[in-house]
Image: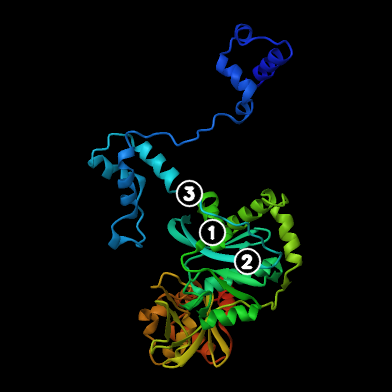
Amino acid sequence: MIEDVGEIQRLWYEEEATYREIEKELGVSSKTIAKALKRPEEFVEGYQREKPGRRPVLGPYEERIEELLKGKEWARGKRVKRTARYVYRRLKKAGYKGAESTVRAYIRERYRKPKATCPIEYYPGGEVQFDFGKYTVKIGDRVRVVHFMGATFGYSTRRQLFAYPAEKQECLFDGIERTYQRAGGVSERATLDNTKLAVVKLLKGRNRKETESYKAFRTMLGIEPRFTNRRSAWEKGHVEGTVGWAKRQVLMDLEVSDWEELQKVLDEACEEDAQSRRHGESGKLVAELYGEECQLMRPFPYEGRRSHKRIRAKVSTQGRITVEGSRYSVPIRLRSRHVRVNLYWDELVVFSEHEEIVRYERDWSGRGQAYKVEHYFELLERSPALLDHGKPFTRMPEWLKVTRERLRDDGEFIELLLAVDKGEYVVEELEGGCRAALEAGCVTVMT
């Protein structure tokens, strides 16, 4: 049509042809000729409707639509989502004969205007955003809900993911710590939502009363706290996007053999994303910007230490402590005393008077029982029958069971165990000696 405009203007101005002659030569109407000569810009801009199209069927119901969307006066201000389908069904009961799509189009044009936005900017090393998500993954033979922590650097948008069995404070600390350790430095701020893991109470504005443990942790790292406003997840939109990306692109239908493989999958996915995704504004690879950002971050303040949650526990008369529902043995001599427990996401370490007593792999089931048989050796001196009935002894390692079977009687076996309790040698030495003797055939059964 643009070519026709040029030809019409040439015939009219240069050859002085009449409307009829142009109609005959080009096969166009007189209205088209008039538009080409008087309003040629309309051929470029296209037709522009000056007034909204009439909706003769919907028109009588427009006021009712507004009433339905506002809701009853007593219900206004409640967080209720009144959908276009809800409005359509109500209008249909009132006699509306039109299509649902017409109602949807009217509501979209009339009420659902795009929200105003503002460009945002981050400077290198200024902020890292953190958030938790959860998703179902098959680990070994068990299908379980995995809680994962996402971290996103504001400037480079580099992503990091860490998987945990639960959303606990020690998991939060571990994820933040590992994020900064990998970067080789810390940002000025760490942004969180108002999670109970870090916030006790929301005060006026952005002020928060932090938990004592989170305050101590971030002070040790040297980072400033930043928390989003109430119900304002978009204020940490980068990490919200990371959590969604992890669910859709990484964890969906995932099967792994163990937690170690799961973490490896997450690390590889984040690295591949950094090496292939380009930053929207600069056009540089995320990995390139991340390298620049890491060089400008403040040095990581400490090494050789893992953050943890510290609790006190009382040892029962059975020589056990209870931590979040699971029971762990400690030396029976500590019964009825209090011990200190350093609780990490993957293990717990028990101390008595600043001396490490024992450490265990953490049980997340809330009903587990873990025993170390050496904690109960001293009881055998007065109760040898515990070898048959005591839970720690019925669950003792296989090498001890075989040693007991091959010795002449339980008296000799108990003497070996009591020697450990008296400090003549340690369990590791006993194990090495028993295994060597069993392999050499030195221990025999009485005939």
Q: Residues within 10 Å of mark 2 (few under 14, many from 20)?
A: many
Question: Which residue is labeled 3 in the image?
Answer: 113
**Rendered view: 131 above or below 245:** below
Residue 401's disc is none
The residue lying at 63 percent from left, 24 percent from top is 38
Q: Amino acid at mark 3?
A: Lys
The residue lying at 41 percent from left, 69 percent from top is 365
Q: Nearer the viewer, residue 134 or 409?
A: 134
- Looking at the image, tell me whether mark 3 or mark 1 is earlier in sequence order: 3
- Looking at the image, tell me whether mark 1 or mark 2 is earlier in sequence order: 2
Question: The residue tagged with tag 3: helix, strand or loop?
Answer: loop
Q: Nearer the viewer, residue 433 or 100?
A: 100
Residue 128's disc is 2
Q: Amino acid at mark 1?
A: Glu
Q: Nearer the viewer, residue 2 or 265?
A: 2
- Looking at the image, tell me whether mark 2 or mark 3 is earlier in sequence order: 3
Mark yes or no: residue 157 visible. yes
Question: Which residue is labeled 1 in the image?
Answer: 240
The quadrant in which residue 119 appears is: bottom right
**Rendered view: 56 above or below 358:** above
Q: Amino acid at mark 2?
A: Val
Question: The residue tagged with tag 2: helix, strand or loop?
Answer: strand
Question: The residue tagged with tag 1: helix, strand or loop?
Answer: helix
Indicate the position of residue 319 as horizontal and vertical percent values. Answer: 42, 87
Q: Quadrant of the N terminus?
A: top right
Indicate the position of residue 106 as horizontal and vertical percent values. Answer: 40, 41
Q: CA distance from mark 2 to mark 3?
A: 32 Å
**Rendered view: 430 above or below 56:** below
Q: Is residue 258 left or right of residue 157?
A: left
